[in-house]
Image (spheres, rainbow, N blue to C red):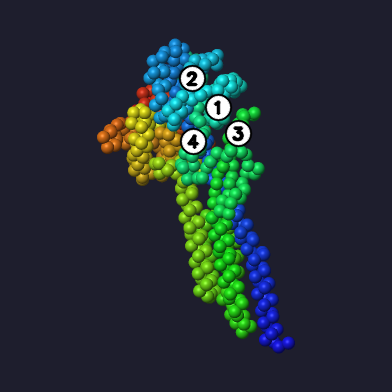
Amino acid sequence: MKIQTQTFIILIIFIGLFLSLLFFIIRPQLLEEAHKYDQRSLEEDITRVENYIEMEKDSLLRLNRDWAVWDATYNFINDKDENYLTSNLADETFTNNQLQYMMFLNEHYEVVHQKGYQYAKETALDIEPAFLDRLLSEIRLRGGGENTFFLRNNGTMMMLSTHEVARSDTTMGEDSGMLVMGRMMNDSYVQRIGESLSIDLTVSPEPLSSSIKVTGENSLTGVIRIGDIPGETRLILEVTGSRTFYNEMLSSSYVQMLLVTIGLSTLSLLFYFIVKYFAIDPVSQIAKQMKKIDFDATFTSRVSVKRRANTEIRELERSINSMLGTLETNHEKTLHMAYYDQLTQVSNRFYLYKEFPRFAANSDKKTAILFFDLDGFKQVNDTWGHEIGDKLLMKVSTRLKEYFSKDKVILSRIGGDEFVVVINYEDEEYLNTKISGIGEVLNKKYDFDEVSTYISASIGVSLYPEDGTSLVQLLKNADIAMYKAKDLGKNNFVFHQDSSKESHSS
């Protein structure tokens, strides 16, 4: 057999072996890693939805607290004044607060008054007797207090919160009953969550057999099960994500194999080492680097061909790097959505909890937590609607960012009209000056087209580590101090350590 034939046979065998290696070993590994990344992306979306629902539960409980710890509600439980219902339980109240159900109980857990209203349909909400029985039973079982849980009414899941009714000044009188608020988790509610998070979210008609599964060539589907009461049918939400990375990797692998096949099949023994030097080795470099990049969560790495390579390999390198650049940009956008409030563009609760330990540990100065909400914000919302309320929040955030622009702080909006500022300080005089400045900055006129208003801020202050070593404890103490500031006339600030003393005027 001629050497030329032998060489040709050897080349054919080599090409076959190389293509087999590429197709049956390397390619499946890359596709599997791409599939795992798509799964991780969907899991992150599921976590975002779960966190959003937890924030909704906190928001509903805070709204309930605002109504329950109010002298007018306390008096209504005792004297059943119809003027309270006329003034406060109009249909607009349910619409503005996105509620569908309110129920007032006396101290014996007897229904004083209840109202259900579907603001989307502008009709009364039908309350099943069985739902009411289960609700009262659950409240008794939990023994009152602050609670959030889920029950079904007429087949639709309802998020419920309970809070004991008390006077605004909690030092006067005893608890006088219970206030229950409910929010329907129907299709429109789920759709609103999906739109807020830019996630494809729907209600599942029936449970899926697994948490995450492939439901199409371009899609993955995961589930969230909502419900915490034994015997109650859970609400099943489906989160649909795309298989973007998998499909891009699949397309890239086809191009890669085609290029290698064409290149190797047209070469002779004379050009073998040239091909090895310019094509096979660069492709191997890229494959090895891609395996490492799969474990780089920030996608900041790039592939590079160290040896001199042909145009096709360079184009492949640029395409992969372009893809990685796109993934890095999308990852940064996802982080921004996860850690920043989309309305005000200041950081949110998740960023605050993530950064506080590092912020406090990396400073040689003292650290203070300023917890405040906006006095008069609810009246602005109720009077001019959520659009003006949102514009007000944006202007407040802008003023705060400008005010703290030269300071090292964490400025976060943690929900509704509640803000938290974490600031370093050297002495109490400086801290008092900065806190007083917040009131001066915020208590100025706000103009919105034909609408003008004023607001102020009640500020509670806790000090690290004197008032707590964990952020949860510090926020709780600052919240207590803030309510003390409100009780003393609003537009004030109170240190948690001084909460039993006179407040400071902002």
Disc 2 target residue: 114
Marks 2 and 3, the one that precedes in the sequence: 2
- For the residues marked 2 and 3, what is the alpha-carbon distance in whole angstroms? 25 Å
- For the residues marked 1 and 3, what is the alpha-carbon distance in whole angstroms? 12 Å
Q: Nearer the viewer, mark 1 or mark 2?
A: 1
Disc 3 target residue: 234
Disc 1 target residue: 153
Asked if residue 84 is positioned above or below residue 375 in the image, the reply reads: above
Residue at 33 percent of width and 31 percent of height: 384
- Asked if the residue at tag 2 contacts the one at tag 1, i.e. Cβ–Cβ closer than 8 Å, the answer is no
Residue at 48 percent of width and 59 percent of height: 325
Marks 1 and 3, the one that precedes in the sequence: 1
Question: How many other residues sit within 10 Å of disc 3, few (<14), some (14-19) or many (≥20)?
Answer: some
- For the residues marked 1 and 2, what is the alpha-carbon distance in whole angstroms? 14 Å
Where is residue 86 shown, x and y percent of the image?
A: 39, 18
Question: Callout 1, which amino acid?
Answer: Asn
